[in-house]
Image (cartoon, grey):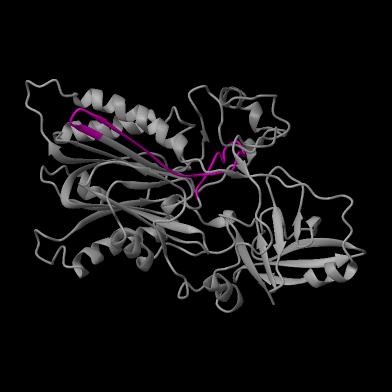
């Protein structure tokens, strides 16, 4: 009842402690990004498709984790934008809204890092100039746009952001016909379902379809306040509250308002910092009104896959792009703008579902596992994750306790009171609760919270 549909086990202690930059950051300069190395075009599953007109690149700082996803249109393209929700973050949106009839778009950058991540869009514009692809003439200055998701705050214990170096690495690694699904690129630290406390890990998804000469591709980074919903009304990614009715669907949660905001329901866990950013690309030439309507139609349709959608605490943005490679004659049986919108809307639902990565599963403590006081004492100490979060481990009468220190809690390890952590095996501990929590101690003086894709690494002082 407490588990999402997909799950994976935590890694063995120390398995993911191979990043020298992560160790240096935790030991010496926990808030510096100077030592970080971009990981390009890695992680997740690949969606492959045949469309050489544009290129896609991803880059990540695994130490965050956080990332960037870049779309590059070498021959420029037409673009429209549709923004919803209470907090959209965009670059060059007002220019796009002017609706000029020339193809101007060079690139779109989707990034984590909240408004700090908007640097990604301007960084790509700089890269286009630095690489000699655009210059400073008034008619050749690159139009680079983009939008961001919020992946900071309580979901991780550092404030590493997608910076210029990361964005340009993604741009220069871009290639046609490959998109990474799941916890990759801008979706590296996405989450969904904050409204109902689902708090599942999110990611980026995509879908591609070709109908005759028409090509449609849709992409989305899902970091939504609402819950993800499949076509049967089920919630495919959600850490369920044990107090919920058995087999509760999203309609039960929605219909339960306002009672579902009372004790026993997780609705009180409202948090800001949610956004879904999306891109629709077609090769058919559309006039400006049709492209604007495509953006609005597909964006509106996403309220079926994400419920609720475009709330006051979301910042949802969708870009509709036409490469205009295909311009069917009026007498042809080509799809109309309306029909393209319907097809793309169904594809976007598929893309939302394809964004879901495997979720970490709960691990069970071993009640009969007795570790020596000396072993437990060896784990004791203060572990620094950043300049504002540390975790203090103490041993008392053969039991181990964890307590956050600094300005913020460390997930379920709070500053208010020590939390007992229970052994799974030597070096790996857990604490019971609605959300999985694992603490892995290494023999190199490191503490890894939730080892794996979303791990946080602290160094012993």
Q: Is residue 337 above or below residue 354?
A: above
Q: Is residue 414 above or below residue 326?
A: below
Q: Quadrant of the C terminus?
A: bottom right
* Callout count: 0
Residue displayed at 16% across by 42% down:
99
In the current view of this chain or complex, which residue is farthest to the right?
397
Judge from the rendering whether residue 332 lies leftward or rightward of residue 121; answer left or right. left
Q: Is residue 317 above or below residue 245?
A: below
Q: Which residues are magenta?
A: 190-215
Q: Quadrant of residue 258?
A: top right
The spot of residue 85 in percent (x, y) is 41, 40
Q: Is residue 38 above or below residue 263?
A: below
The spot of residue 272 in percent (x, y) is 52, 47
Q: Is residue 194 magenta?
A: yes
Q: Quadrant of the N terminus?
A: top right
Residue displayed at 30% across by 64% down:
123
Look at the image and tell me whether residue 42 can be seen. yes
Q: Is residue 343 magenta?
A: no
Q: Nearer the viewer, residue 50 or 185?
A: 50
Residue displayed at 34% across by 34% down:
299
Q: Quadrant of residue 215?
A: top left
Judge from the rendering whether residue 135 lies leftward or rightward of residue 409; answer left or right. left
The spot of residue 270 in percent (x, y) is 58, 42
Q: Nearer the viewer, residue 405 or 257?
A: 405
In the current view of this chain or complex, which residue is farthest to the bottom?
28
Q: Nearer the viewer, residue 261 or 146?
A: 146
Look at the image and tell me whether residue 90 can be seen. no
Residue displayed at 47% across by 75% down:
35
């Amino acid at each position: 009842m407490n588990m999402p549909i997909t799950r994976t086990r935590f890694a063995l202690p120390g398995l993911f402690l191979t990043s020298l930059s992560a160790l240096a950051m935790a030991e010496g300069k926990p808030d510096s990004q100077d030592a970080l190395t971009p990981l390009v075009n890695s992680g997740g599953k690949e969606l492959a498709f045949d469309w050489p007109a544009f290129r896609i690149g991803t880059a990540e700082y695994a130490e965050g984790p956080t990332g960037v996803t870049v779309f590059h249109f070498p021959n420029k393209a037409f673009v429209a934008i549709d923004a919803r929700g209470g907090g959209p973050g965009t670059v060059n949106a007002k220019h796009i809204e002017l609706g000029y009839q020339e193809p101007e778009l060079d690139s779109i950058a989707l990034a984590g890092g909240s408004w700090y991540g908007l640097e990604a869009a301007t960084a790509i514009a700089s890269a286009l100039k630095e690489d000699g692809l655009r210059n400073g003439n008034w008619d050749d200055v690159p139009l680079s746009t983009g939008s961001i998701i919020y992946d900071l705050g309580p979901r991780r214990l550092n404030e590493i952001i997608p910076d210029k170096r990361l964005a340009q690495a993604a741009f220069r690694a871009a290639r046609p016909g490959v998109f990474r699904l799941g916890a990759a690129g801008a979706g590296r630290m996405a989450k969904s379902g904050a409204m109902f406390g689902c708090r599942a890990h999110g990611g980026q998804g995509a879908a591609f379809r070709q109908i005759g000469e028409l090509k449609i591709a849709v992409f989305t980074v899902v970091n939504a306040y609402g819950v993800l919903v499949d076509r049967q009304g089920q919630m495919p990614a959600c850490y369920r509250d044990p107090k919920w009715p058995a087999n509760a669907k999203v309609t039960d949660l929605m219909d339960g308002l306002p009672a579902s905001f009372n004790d026993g329901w997780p609705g009180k866990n409202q948090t800001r910092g949610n956004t879904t950013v999306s891109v629709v690309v077609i090769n058919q030439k559309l006039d400006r009104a049709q492209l604007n309507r495509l953006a609005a139609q597909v964006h509106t349709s996403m309220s079926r896959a994400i419920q609720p959608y475009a709330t006051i605490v979301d910042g949802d943005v969708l870009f509709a792009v036409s490469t205009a490679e295909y311009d069917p004659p009026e007498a042809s049986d080509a799809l109309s703008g309306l029909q393209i919108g319907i097809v793309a809307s169904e594809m976007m639902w598929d893309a939302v579902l394809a964004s879901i990565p495997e979720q970490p599963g709960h691990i069970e403590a071993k009640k009969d596992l007795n570790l020596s006081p000396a072993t437990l004492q060896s784990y004791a100490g203060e572990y620094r994750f950043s300049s504002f979060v540390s975790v203090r481990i103490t041993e008392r009468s053969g039991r181990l306790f964890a307590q956050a220190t600094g300005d913020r809690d460390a997930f379920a390890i709070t500053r208010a009171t020590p939390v007992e952590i229970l052994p799974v095996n030597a070096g790996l501990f857990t604490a019971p609760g609605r959300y999985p929590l694992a603490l892995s101690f290494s023999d190199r003086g490191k503490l890894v919270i939730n080892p794996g894709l979303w791990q946080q690494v602290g160094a012993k002082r």
